[in-house]
Image (cartoon, rainbow, N blue to C red):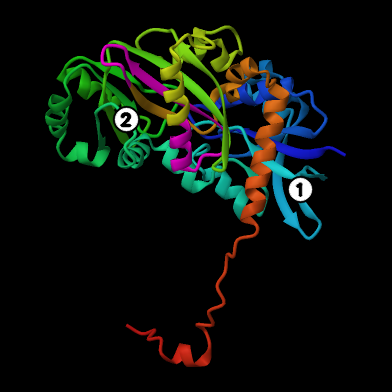
Amino acid sequence: MKITIGMVFGGLSVEHEISVITALQAYHHYKNEKYELLPIYLGKDKTFYYGKALKEIKNYSHLPSLLKKCHKVQFIKNRRGNYMKVGHKKIALDAIWLVTHGNNCEDGSLYNYFNMLDFICIGMDHFQGSISQDKVLCKQILQANKIKQTKYFSIHYLQYNQNSDVVFAQAKKIGYPLIVKPAKLGSSVGITICFNDAQLIDAIEQVFQYDTKALVEEYIEEAKEFNISLLGDVDFYQNSVIEEVTKCSFLSYEDKYQNQSKNKGMAGLNRIVPAIIEEKLKQEIIQTSKKIATILESHLCVRLDFLYDTKKEILYFNEINNIPGSLAFYLWEKTDLNFSDLIDQIIDIGIRHEYHKTELTLTYPANIFSRDELDQIKMSK
C-alpha cells in the first residue's frame, strides 16, 4: 500500500510561481510506487486548495479560473489519524511535504503551522529555516565558524530611515562595485550591482519594497559561480556533482526563470554539469559544503552556492537554499540518481528526521500550581 504524501506548494511569497514549477516538475517526474503524491496548492489568498486542475501548469495562467475548479482544504487531526477535508470528503494523509520557496514558506513558517496541527511535516523547521533564509544571520553564524565569505554589511530599514548616510561609510570600507540584495528573499529578486553612492541608495530603497533588511556585499569581478547539492542529515551527507553557472556577472530573477526554456525552472540555466575544475577545488567545495550543512543542521536536499575568485584563488560561500529550485534534480541525475529516487530519498530522510522528534520530551513535570506554590506567587501589582 502506498504512503500518501500531501505535497504543499505555492504560498504567500515572491517565489510563489517558482514553487509551482518545482512542485509540478516533481509530481510529473515521480514514477515510483512507494509514495502517492497529492498536490495541495496554497494560494496567495492564504487558502489551501485541492483538485485535478492543479496538476497542469498551463492552468496557472489564470488563477481565478483555476481556483473555481478546485476545493478548499481543511487539515484535521483526530484519534483516527491525519487527513484533509475536501468538501464532504476526507482524504487520509501520512505526511506533508513542503515544496515551497521564499519567505513565509521556506523559512519554517509553514512547517510550524503543520507542526502545531501535529502532522508529520517534511521540511525545515523554524530554527533551521529562519537561519538559512536570513542571509545576514546565516553569514554571521558561518563567520563565527571561520567559513570564508566576501566582505559585507547589512542595514535594517528603521536604521536607514533614521540616518541613510551610514551606508556610505560602510560602502567605502569595502569599495565599489557592490551587490545589494534582500536579506530574506531568494531567486535573485531585488538584486542590483552598484557602482556609486547614488546607485547604492536606489538599490537599497528597492530592497525595502520586498524586505525589512538589505544585505550589501563585495562584488568579485573575476569570479566563477559553483553550485552543489547535498542530500541527507547531520549524521551523513551525500553530494551531487558540482555545476558551474556560466551566465553573466550575476543572475537576476529573469535570468533564472523568465528567459529559460518553458517550465524548466532552475534546470534551464546556462550551466556546465559537471563543472570542469581541478580536483583540489572540487574537494574544497564538497568538504566546505558538508561543514556548512552540519553547522546549520541542514537536512533533506539543499543547494549551496559558491563564488570562486579566479584572481586570488579563494573560494567564498555565497548562500544556501533549503528547498532548491527544481529540487536540484539536474545535479543529481549526473550521479545516476533519477528524479523519482531523489524524491523517495527526500521523503525518507524527512520522515526519519520527524520520527526522532516524536521521542523528545516536550513537557516537564513541575507542579508549580500546587497549593503551596500558589501561595508564594504574588498576583497583584
Q: Which amino acid is tagged 1? A: Tyr
Residue at 41% x, 86% y is: 377
| Residue 70: x %, y % from top left | 73, 31
Sort mark 1 into few (<14), some (14-19) or many (20+) by Cα contacts within 10 Å.
Answer: many
Q: Nearer the viewer, residue 365 or 278?
A: 278
Q: Position of residue 61 (x, y in %)?
A: 62, 17
Which of the two discs, 2 and 1, labels the residue nearer the N terminus? Answer: 1
The quarter of the image holding the N terminus is top right
Residue in the image at 34% along x and 10% along y: 249
Q: Is 307 inside the magenta-drawn segment?
A: yes
Residue at image x 78%, y 34%?
35
Q: Which residue is mark 2?
A: 148
Asked if residue 308 is positioned above or below residue 69 in the image, the reply reads above
Check residue 282 in the rendering and tell me which mark sits there, or answer none: none
Number of the front mark, 2 or 1: 2
Q: Is residue 381 left or right of residue 344?
A: left
For residue 189: magenta? Answer: no
Residue 322 on image: x %, y %: 51, 33
Specify whether 105 is left or right of 190: right
Secondary element at image label 2: loop
Helix, strand or loop status at disc 1 = strand
What is the total number of numbered labels drawn onto the structure image? 2
Name the residue: 52% across, 35% down.
12
Local crowd size for mark 2, using a 10 Å CA cut-off: few (<14), some (14–19), many (≥20): some
Q: Residue furthest right?
A: 1
Q: Amino acid at mark 2?
A: Lys
CA–CA distance between discs 2 and 1?
46 Å
Q: Position of residue 47 (x, y in %)?
A: 62, 39
Horizontal side of 110 relative to 28 (left or right) equals left
Quarter of the image for the C terminus: give it.
Answer: bottom left
Q: Which residue is mark 1?
A: 83
Q: Quadrant of residue 31?
A: top right
